[in-house]
Amino acid sequence: MIQVGMAYYPEHWDRSLWEKDASRMAKLGVHAVRLAEFAWSRMEPEEGRFDFGWLDDAIDVIARHGMRVILSTPTNSGPMWLYTDHPETVQWGRDGRPTDLGIRGHRCIQSPVFRRYAGRIVEEMAQRYAGRPEILAWQIDNELESNHCTCPSCREAFRRWLREKYGTVEALNKAWGSEVWSGEISSWEQIQPLLAPDCMPDWHNPAFMLDYERFGAWSLADFIQRQRDIIKDHDPDAIVTTNSWFCANMPDFYQEFASLDVAAYDNYPPMDLPEDGETLYSNAFGLDLVRSFKRKNFWILEQLGGAGGCWSPMGPAPWPGMIEGYALQAVAHGADLVSFFRWRSSCSGAEMLGHGVLDHDDRDNRRLAEIGRFCRRLEAMPELDRTGLHSDVAMLYGPDQEFVLKNQRQSRNFAYWTQLRLFHDACMGLGVNLDVAPESAALEGYKVVLVPTHYVTDPALAARLEAFAAGGGTVVVTNRSGVKDKHNNCIFGEALPTVFRRLCGCRVEEYDAIGDDRRHIAAVNGGSFAVTGWCDLLEPEGAQVWARYTEKFYAGTAAITKNAFGAGWAYYVGAVGERALYRSLLLEIFRAQDIPVLTALPQGVEVTTRSGEGGTYRFFFNDTLHGKTFPVDGQMVSLRPMEMKIQGEGGEWL
Ligand code: GLA
Ligand code: ZN
């Protein structure tokens, strides 16, 4: 059965409330209570003096009500004594100064002193709780980010990491091409972390930036693995995870979760839903990306439970149906556990206006009722956790691409996520499951592989894609692919898309970074589409032309090509188009590959399928604030705003 969780902070409430809270949660249908991710000062009030009595009691209350615990390590926020007695544990910002105390998340995850104290509290917790039947799983820290701390420990660690990678400063200078602007170093001490936000990132060497991001991602994964190892030493069967999010300092999620048992994510979907805006299908994309972290079903450790209100002015109230609908959407994309944030809004602290399920008044409310409805619907599908998503279509995602395209924008109106999202949105609109996959993923079993902007290039991937196409698959490559080598330097002496040129049967003769401007392309088989961001002017070398530009000095020049390669096809998309372009292109590709599509879905409705030993379930979700009616398999389906309908194996509605 899919599990339902709830974030709870016993340390925020008078003990007299615990019993009643647990009983209300159990009655609601909650299976697991998530505890303790910020409670270090209560567990270790003074250096070396541990107090777990209160946590024991809280766990006992929860267990007495038939629920289990997701226990978090509290390393996100050290106690005040740690920061003041050991200032080297404090994180430093881009300004090269220690962060203010009294907030949260301001610890240096690389500092050896911090790691010693973090290791000790995790060891104490693992000794006490690992292997106990009340514990369902462990969460490491909270919403970790890639390490961009600039403190002396992190400087040292970055230098060590580079030294291990390159061996000599000469090798580093060569890899980075640091002769430009006299950036060559003659000793490791000259290496700095990324400082000075005002000239970030355009003035820095892109090769330095990429290694800095890779170091930050490694540092995070290393921090996670150490905690994981401590817990596993006490209970090798423990389920250990961490709650990821799409943050400013994006980690390499594949590395982040490599040592963990299940991927997890904090799911705060958009609350305003313009019918045709940027947010359309955005949450579906995020969930499919999270499913790629371990290439299997995942958990949601924080799910929208009320209006936000900490990091910015308060957010809007969730519309009726949103809390239930979004929780079911997570399940539809592969979540096997959905834990809501949080039981009750706190009365103190910076996040007092961040709304939990219950308001400060503690009365039952419509948000609670929606979570109850969510629980009832899951109870009606007890076998659902024995299913997963199966896809004919894979889309490659690369952390390196994420890093470099964020730090060196190609043009206004060109972003890696937009490139990915445009293809993903089109799949959602056609009711086609899509797997996001790491660049190293095996391609067997897929019919179509989408490769948006493979910018930092791996020639081995090009060879694998050639074999895939030769065997009958369809590959779609886009603009800004094959541009950089593994150090993030431009590839010399080869026409773009370099390693993909043979597969795509075309070359980029010239390009135009048009930013916010718009041009148009006409498809050879009919249809005209607006494009923006970037225009590659293509010269076919064996490929057919799929669409041509209609304006400017390149009117008549190929914008999209289609190349027969062995038994399959390779498309090259030279521009960034409007939604309709991707729909038209993918419809052609899916039909040719016999992938079933639903052509009558209104925009904003998404359809995904979970199947396996537990049966087959088709999820129809209306991710808009307007009612939608549309035909499916000869019958009309109507969905209220934010409504999820689920169809069982025999076509019955569940
Ligand atoms: C994040 C954090 C939580 C809380 C919520 C507020 O997801 O992990 O501790 O601050 O945001 O919405
Ligand atoms: Zn640091």
Image (spheres, rainbow, N blue to C red):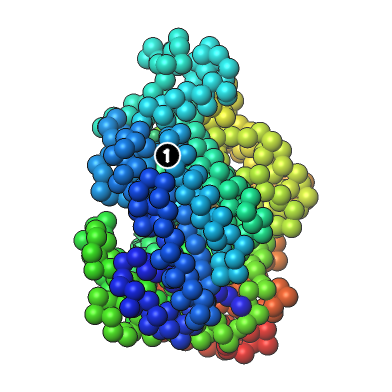
Question: At 42% across and 53% down in the image, what residue appears?
Answer: 50
Circle 1: element type = helix
Quadrant placement of the N terminus: bottom right
Image location (x, y in percent) of residue 497 = 58, 35
Taking the view exactly as shown, the residue that stands out farthest to the left is 313
Question: At 46% across and 39% down in the image, what residue appears?
Answer: 115
The correct choice, above or below, for 504 with respect to 42 in the image is above
> Disc 1 marks which residue?
114
- Horizontal side of residue 613 vs 80, given as left or right: right
Image location (x, y in percent) of residue 600 = 52, 76
Quadrant placement of the C terminus: bottom right
Image location (x, y in percent) of residue 12 = 31, 66
Q: Quadrant of ligand 1?
A: bottom left
Residue 199 in view (yes/no): no
Label 1 CA crowd tier, 10 Å (few <14, some 14–19, many 20+) = many
- Horizontal side of residue 482 vs 182, given as left or right: right
Quick one: 371 or 485, which is closer to the camera? 371
Quick one: 525 or 495, which is closer to the camera? 495
Image location (x, y in percent) of residue 148 = 39, 37
- Residue type at tag 1: Phe
